[in-house]
Amino acid sequence: MERGGPKLQTDESSLIKLIESCDSKFEAVEKLLLRLFDTETVINSSVSGKRANSQVVNTKKPLDYLKMVNMRDVLKRKFPNLKRSDLTSRIHSVQKKLRRQQNKL
């Protein structure tokens, strides 16, 4: 049990089942991100952990590398032509969506 709730299945076959009905890459990425990471982690992390080209002093921690590899592999099965840059932009879109929802609260 994690955080008072049932442990979610994060093995590859469970993740493949999770996105089998998804028609869009965005929907699949969102479902996988929220299965593999809690919302706060998604909002407060970066995809690579590298500092942005800005004056921000603090860099965000990267999302867990092994989970990201697992997610990419699952997405590649569903969307064989998925590019790394495509995945990164969709993760950024999910992060923005979650930040907007958090700011409304």
Image: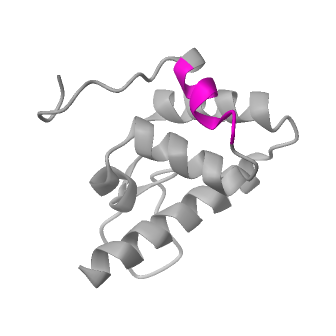
Identified at 33% across, 60% down, the residue is 44
Q: Is residue 19 magenta?
A: yes
Q: How is the image coloured?
A: one colour
Q: Quadrant of the N terminus?
A: top left
**Where's residue 21, x and y in %?**
69, 39
* Looking at the image, residue 92 lies above or below residue 6: below
Taking the view exactly as shown, the residue that stands out farthest to the front is: 21
Taking the view exactly as shown, the residue that stands out farthest to the left is: 4
The chief SS type of the magenta part is helix
Location of residue 36 (image quadrant): top left
**Where's residue 34, x and y in %?**
43, 46
Identified at 52% across, 45% down, the residue is 31
Q: Nearer the viewer, residue 45 or 81?
A: 81
Taking the view exactly as shown, the residue that stands out farthest to the right is: 81
Q: Is residue 24 magenta?
A: no
Identified at 57% across, 67% down, the residue is 93
* Looking at the image, residue 45 lies above or below residue 52: above
Count of picture labels: 0
Q: Nearer the viewer, residue 101 or 48?
A: 101
**Where's residue 77, x and y in %?**
77, 27
Residues in magenta?
14-21
* Looking at the image, residue 90 lies above or below residue 31: below
Left or right: where 104 falls relative to 31: left
Q: Quadrant of the C terminus?
A: bottom left
**Where's residue 47, x and y in %?**
51, 52
